[in-house]
Image: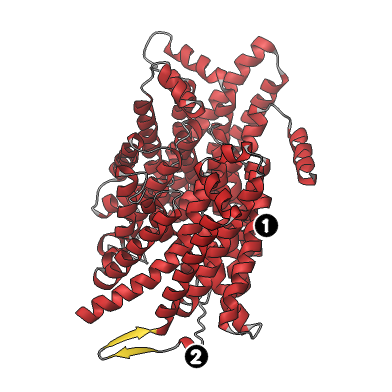
Amino acid sequence: MIESVLMALIDGLALAMLIFLIASGLTIIFGLMGMLNFAHGAFFMLGAYIAVSVVEDLGLGYAISLPISFLIGFVVGAFLEMLTLRPLHGKHVPQIIVSLGLLYILIQLVIIMWGTVAKLYVPTWLSGGFRLGEFIILKTRVFIILTGLLVALVLHLFLSKTRVGLIVLAGVEDAQMVESLGINIKKVFTLTFALGAALAFLGGALAEPWQGANLALSGYMFLGFVAVVMGGLGNYKGSFYASLLVGMIHALTAHFLPFLTFVIDFVLMAVVLLVRPRGLFG
Amino acid sequence: MSLRTPGGLKRFLALVEETPHILVAIAFFYAIPFMVPTLYWVRILSMAFVLALFALAYDVALGLTGLPSFGHAAIFGMGAYALVWSLRLGLPLPIAIVASLLMGVALGALMASFLKQVREIYYAMVTLAMAEIMHMLMDKAVQISGGFTGLRVPMPDSLYSPGVLIAHLALSCTVLFMCIVVAFRKMKVERSRAALAYMILATLLLLALLMAFPTLAYKAFYTPVYRLVFALYFISFTALWTSYVLLRRLANSTFGSVLVGIRENEERMLALGYDTAKYKMLSMVISGLFTGLAGGLFALVSLTPVRPDLLGAEYTIEVLLYSILGGLGTLIGPMVGAGIITFLDMRLRPFLGAYWLLFMGVFYVLVMLFLPFGIVGTLFYKRVSARRLFLKLLRSLRR
């Protein structure tokens, strides 16, 4: 019993890191641009497929696929933002509708390019686990947790210590004020969207040795939504704590109440929205 | 509107004369299945009508009132389930349809109850969460939802009876006859060429209908499937036009103006003394009612088992696509959008395969960027001709 609880908690922690990589981008994009990006699930999924392709088609190592998918994500995000979201500047509901369209397009592109069959590649240095008596910690989970924490730290330093990061945070507080101070807010929007997309791509690439690359990965976006809502929309630190909570809850329900997986997450999201719309950590 | 009051018939005729296009459209669509050579087109049209009804119902919430509900698929899917469950319990078809209506009202009221606490994007997220909760629960409750294979819809015997076909024929003859009368009266008054054209068209259709009758009777007598397909067509089209007429009257009434006012500027309506919360909730319940009806009819008309997938977010995206393509808030636009997409779906999907959905997605984004009012919306609101609309599109593509 105690072993399975511990296993669930470690899975939950690894899941929490993946959720954070989705939620951090979503929450900053929401805070700054006021839109909910439904294409984020597709970004996450694309990251996993790119990781597989880098290894299988380009013959490079898995470790190098992480920065590659981050960079591709950045370029794709910037491109999509300039092409589709910038013309609808300030219109939130049309932007959401466009992002739904992007989700549709990206999922179909994945089907056309990679087919519907799930792929899995686990590098040798990540296969297996550490054994502690009865209890095994899988190496992929450890790798995801460590990388996730590192990314969270770097993101925190970027947002709170660099000039660009501070501009982004100020934009989350009050975009109009930032604009009136002579900063080109449109560039900040593009940068933020690209950064959010890149984080989601990185999350997908990170998830690949655990979950494989498959079409169901885009569903993790919903867990990202739950974390965003619980952390308070626009609050990236809140979304970190909320991701930990959501990851744990999801992993525990998946282990012990499989009938209620995803149901509990959505119930949590609805309750938080109705009772505390500013989030648990806001 | 009652026909029994003195002068009722005259009032009714006057009302019809105000909107002759609707009458002509009704007559046309009632008569058309008797003219087409195969059942294929009758099937496509019936599906298009059901999806158009869904789009119409959705337009009341998002288009007229501006409530971004992302949970309509759950109302739609549960409406379908309400019908299937009632039919499997052995209830007659009218009661099953009422059950899906009631399911729609109940879920519409549930979705409406969140309007007090949250708004705009927060409302979209709450409704999305509610819909996904229902979707996941139904997905896992295999005993009641049928799981992956779904629940087969037991077709009630009444749909195979020739009575429905006779009613259909009688009704289409009556409406065509009414068209002729209205066109004749109009022609006497203003000698317009359009009225003459309508009259000739309606007379020709009526004649063709009467000439088609012997073959029709022969086919209908020997093939039950023929009667079934016609009955489904009749039911879906009747539901569509009645809903449209009702909702059009609603949209043109004071109530409808208040809804549009809320969409445009809620604070202002509040300042004018309207209880906007009540209006928004009512709008959501009405939208839920018609969405439930559309779901029930979908279960009946699609001729496939009802599966939990119907509650999934894909159907919300689908109906959003119809509404946006046609034009939000125009009522007729989303119906046109549903028709166009159903038609393209049937004709293009076999050739394009996986590229079809890609094409749909690109199409969707392009419409959102370049035609934010949709096809019908741009034609009506902006009062531009189709030619100028085309030129404008070309210009914006070049930019």
Q: Which one is in front, A43 or B247?
A: A43
Q: Which one is in front, A61 or B23?
A: A61
Specify the farthest residue to the top. B6
Q: Where B208 falls versus A63 (above or below)?
A: above
Tell me residue A65's x, y (percent): 59, 77
At x 51% / y 46%, what residue is drawn? A172
Q: Amino acid at mark 2?
A: Thr
Q: Which residue is mark 2?
A: A124
Is residue B105 found left or right of A46 in the rendered image?
left
Q: Tag 1, which secondary structure? A: helix
**How many callouts does the rendering have?**
2
At x 64% / y 24%, what residue is drawn? B199
Tell me residue A183's x, y (percent): 65, 43
Tell me residue B62's x, y (percent): 48, 37
Asked if labels 2 and 1 share a chain, the reply is: yes
On the question of residue A39 being in view, the answer is no
Numbered tag placed on residue A79 in the rendering: 1
Q: Amino acid at mark 1?
A: Phe
Q: Where A93 falls versus A11 (above or below)?
A: above
Q: Which of the chains bears the disc numbered 1?
A: A
Measure the alpha-carbon separation of dots 2 and 1.
35 Å
Q: Where B223 falls versus B256 (above or below)?
A: below
Is residue A186 found left or right of A171 in the rendered image?
right
